[in-house]
Image: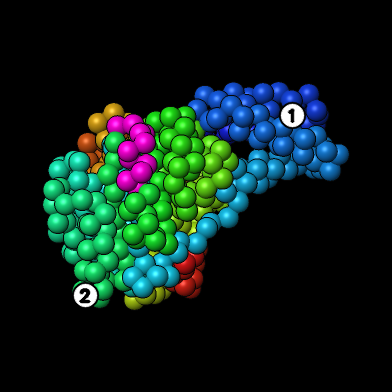
Amino acid sequence: MFQDLSDRFARIFKELRGQGKVREAHIAEAMREVRRALLEADVNYKVVKEFVGRVGERAVGQKVLDSLTPDQQIIKIVHEELVTLLGTKPVSFNLSGSPASVMIVGLQGSGKTSFAAKLAVFARKKGRRPLLVAADIYRPAAVEQLKVLARQIGVPIHAPGTDVPVVEIAESALRVAKRDLCDTVIVDTAGRLHIDREMMAELGSVKGVLAPEETLLVLDSMTGQEAVRVAEEFAREVDLTGVVLTKLDGDTRGGAALSVASVTGKPIKFACVGEKVDDLEAFYPDRMASRILGMGDVLSLIEKAQETIDAKTAQELERKLRRESFTLEDFLGELQRLRKMGPLDQVLGMMPGVKIRGVAGGDAGEKELRKIEAIIRSMTPEERRDPHIIDGSRRRRIAAGSGTLVQDVNRLLNQFQEMRKMMKRFTKMAGKMPFNLPPS
């Protein structure tokens, strides 16, 4: 997610840190590089111009130039301006109706139908009873896809068929929801290959029936500036309450995410970060800005951890860490637990300073985990319990047995010591912090 942009920012800030004294000329050069990086990430030109102007104006102030760490001051300014660009603060997701209805709109191929199922899972986690509604009558495949997803996640679906008018589907969906005591109606409306008057008129009619608490536009983030243009047109024609960005786990340059809130004035409410039904995150501008700048996202990491680590497991792990009885077998177990939290490249990317890039044929995080598993499984039980006994000859034997290099074994043992320190801090945080749902 935003890896190329993150790398560019990292290089820019490294150049600033390399200066003995940061002067206006250095800031001007850095701003040129920031402008180039954002334009190459497909961010809207007007948005880039305003962003660079604000950062540059704040960065050349005497308070920054005369500080002991001007590079850190500039990073702080860039972070604050990125947060503003992305929407300043998370906007609440409104489910106050009885039943509450959510109307999902967007072009065909944007990931609209998949998002409907993900939103149903999200709502159920918040203690709600969702009903999916298949109202894309022009694309039978979309109706079938939603039926399959509904069965997969165990959520009821209302799908009268493609020969029933959309307005009638919306009306009957509200009746079914009340009858079956479903408190959240999620309507997957029809998508087109392009925006047309007929489509907008139909959406207006459906909206008149539903009176939805939320009207969410689903955008494919990989389409760059085209996504921003689509968002502008929908915002003009339909009274949107928010935007959803899909495919943020792909090789996207991030331009849509960094442009859409500023251009349309509509907040980004959700981000789809994978293909699984639970790969949906509430959108936090400050957390996303931190990820873009390589500062990690510890809060999201803790929330993910609390979905997979129960209190008893966390307490046992903390006990082992306190007594320094955390072994390589425990280490392997924790790495496998990280895998359950989502794709490793995304999970590790939430940790400050950790960067794992995808590689051909799979992702680098998974490849690295398989190597670690092979090394640990090539050790004797005694070696796993007490890594200090692993001398040079043992390291050569372990490397040969796991099909790796001695350098890989050395690296793992060093990582184990660092992981033990990190997990001690992390487990205390995860065990003590309450699980905060996104604002509602």
Query: Which of disc 2 and disc 1 is earlier in sequence?
Result: 1
Would residue 95 appear left or right of 188 to someone viewing this image?
right
Which residues, given as a range, are shown in magenta?
193-203
Would residue 439 appear left or right of 314 to someone viewing this image?
right
Q: Nearer the viewer, residue 179 or 299?
A: 179
Return the x and y of residue 147 as percentages of the image width and height: 15, 54
Q: Looking at the picture, which amino acid does disc 1 mark?
A: Ile
Label 2, on which residue? Answer: 179
Return the x and y of residue 152 as percentages of the image width and height: 16, 57
Image marks 1 and 2: residues in contact by CB distance under 8 Å: no
Q: Looking at the picture, which amino acid does disc 2 mark?
A: Arg
Residue 262: say if magenta. Answer: no
| Residue 27: mark | 1
Q: Nearer the viewer, residue 153 or 327?
A: 153
Q: Say which residue appears at 40% left-offset and 46% top-offset.
A: 217
Nearer to us of marks 1 and 2 is: 2
Q: Say which residue appears at 32% left-offset and 46% top-offset.
A: 202
Give the answer, above or below, for where 377 lies relative to 432.
Answer: above
Q: Say which residue appears at 45% left-offset and 61% top-offset.
A: 93
Give the answer, above or below, for where 66 lies relative to 173.
Answer: above
Magenta portion: prevailing SS class: helix
Kindly indicate the quadrant of the structure image that contains residue 381: bottom left
